[in-house]
Image (spheres, rainbow, N blue to C red):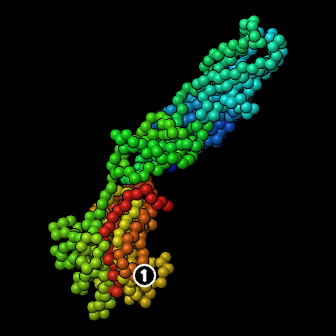
Amino acid sequence: MKKIITYIALGLAVAFGATSCSQDNTPVEGKGEFALKVLFDDQTRATAEELAANCTINIYNSEGLIRTYNGVEAMPSKMWLVTGDYRCDVLAGTESAASFTDKTYKGSKSFTISAGATTTVSIECRVNNVVAAVAFDATIADQFSTFEAQVGGELTAEKALTFNATSASVGYFTLDKNTTALQWQFSGTHVKYGAFTKSGTIEGVEKGKKYTLTFTYTKGTPEGDLAFDIEVVKTTEDIEDNIIFEADPTGVAAVGKWEVWATHATLKANVSESEFGSEGIAIQVRAQGSEEWTVIDAEKAGDNLFSVVAAGLNPETTYEYQLVINGEAVGTSKTFTTDYVTTLPNAGMEDWNSDEGWPMPYATGGTSWWGNGNKAADMAGLVISESDASTYSEGTKSAKLSGKQIKILTIDKVAPGNLFSGSFVATVGTKGGKVNFGRPFTARPSALKVDYKYTCGAITHDEGGPSDDTTPHGVGDPDRCHIYIALGDWDYKTYGGSAESPVQVNTTDVSTLFNPNSDAVIAYGELVKGESVSDWTEAVIRLKYKDTERRPTHIIISCSSSKLGDYLTGSYNSVLWVDDFELIYDQNVVTE
């Protein structure tokens, strides 16, 4: 007789990626209600309730395990799931290597959640042990004064049971992960011939199957000491109420959308640790169409969940991956395609023109990607950003960003040398200018590499700085150069720029200065140097991702000979050279 323990689970919002939780009873748009029924066969009500209270409930989506509950009472009273395909596994009972009473149960079922609908899932939990029944024919009691049979994965006290005329006739076994046979041994004292033993194995046993061993006395030949034998009749039957009806979920999980980068990917696999353990777990990877696999040892990422980082991959390439347990491939393989990469225009600073009357970092007739503040400096007859053929790290030129003093009548200001992705918009009187930062960009690099040199001047002009900058920046203090990179999804309607360059900075209004902590910033990294660097030096500026599940729309790169130049604080003796910009796409992604 089946006992049904019913739990309606609602109100939990589970999303894989970005999710939200709803704690009220109001239906959630785009989600459906999940109702769970747990059934245990042939149990008294008290036993079924005890199993339900102590079971483990795992809920999976296409990306792997998303929720675990210890006992049905631990589940929320209401559960809403995002529409899609799921699987729910229930594990219950007491695991013992060999027992007449302890059983383990397992049930698994796949289901689909539809928006606004209630999906009722019935999971029947059935015996998950190898079951052995022992019967002694009447001829055994007639011919033996004492007798018993041991059965188990191994014939030891911990892993075997002893059956005799008074013991229970059915035993439950949890075999080691590499064991696929039951061993048995009959021992007895024959009324005429004395002590006797016989042993054997039952190969290829399966969970949820019952194997019955019937021991029968057969008379042997009259000659010799051994005048009889023991016949073992093995029968196999399904345990009707207890068979696990669905295949084990062990295998690789579908890769998450945001877990695939240009040259690396995080791959996951579901592994039943109760069956396979947690050692010897790996995932093998190869380019689709290739014959050679690369095997990567996996690390435990959760209950029954393992993961690897496959690195050194090629961009925009389809790869195949598969679970490996103890050197053997398990389950079917799945595929993923790596992300794309984007390079920076004029990264070597080789292309310059003076078509507008001042140096600009792009070829004549070309498209401007990099900008600078030469348009404003030209009003004073100055150049703060130009090519320099006398020093470079590679190629024939570098970009030289020189601080300059603007001194006209009563005006005495410092104009830092600068270079940035974007465009100069206009001057604002004699106090500053407007710049639109950013260029369209949707790739996901992990770092910016740039070669630089720096002549650090003593600060000549101090007109303040941000309140959170505690580094001394008064006149006479060392100046600091600044190189930063930011990825974001700025809306130009909010940030005042254009669709091409969405972030407008007005240096006369500190509220508009670039804020690396704004909600629109997805990743940010910077280099600040407060001393001279006389030789070309390679800097790798790691991006720190605030959110790895958003794709940027724009990139900002900014270089300045004076970090506080937007405040008109800095030195006209500071010079920053930059060359050979390169975006790096490796697996060393830094996150907050």
Q: Is residue 81 visible in this depiction of the protein?
A: no
Give the answer, above or below, for where 591 lies relative to 273: below
Above or below residue 416? Residue 300 is above
Q: Position of residue 69 (x, y in %)?
A: 61, 42
| Residue at the top extreme, as displayed | 222
237 relative to 385 in the view: left or right: right
Residue for point 66% across, 31% down: 174
Question: Would residue 151 be found to the left or right of residue 472 on screen?
Answer: right
Q: Quadrant of residue 399?
A: bottom left
Q: Residue at x 30, y 85 (%)?
A: 404
Total numbered badges shown on the rendered structure: 1
Q: Amino acid at mark 1?
A: Glu
**In which quadrant is the N terminus drawn?**
top right
Answer yes or no: is residue 334 visible: yes
Q: Secondary structure at mark 1?
A: loop
Residue displayed at 48% across by 36% down: 329
Looking at this rendering, what residue extends furthest in the front direction? Answer: 224
173, above or below 305, in the image: above
User: Foreground: 395 or 16?
Assistant: 395
Residue underneath mark 1? 531
Q: Nearer the viewer, residue 94 or 393?
A: 393
Estimate how packed mark 1 is, as few (under 14), some (14 to 19) or many (20 or more) residues with alpha carbons within 10 Å.
some
Q: Residue 309: give x, y in percent of width and height.
A: 46, 50
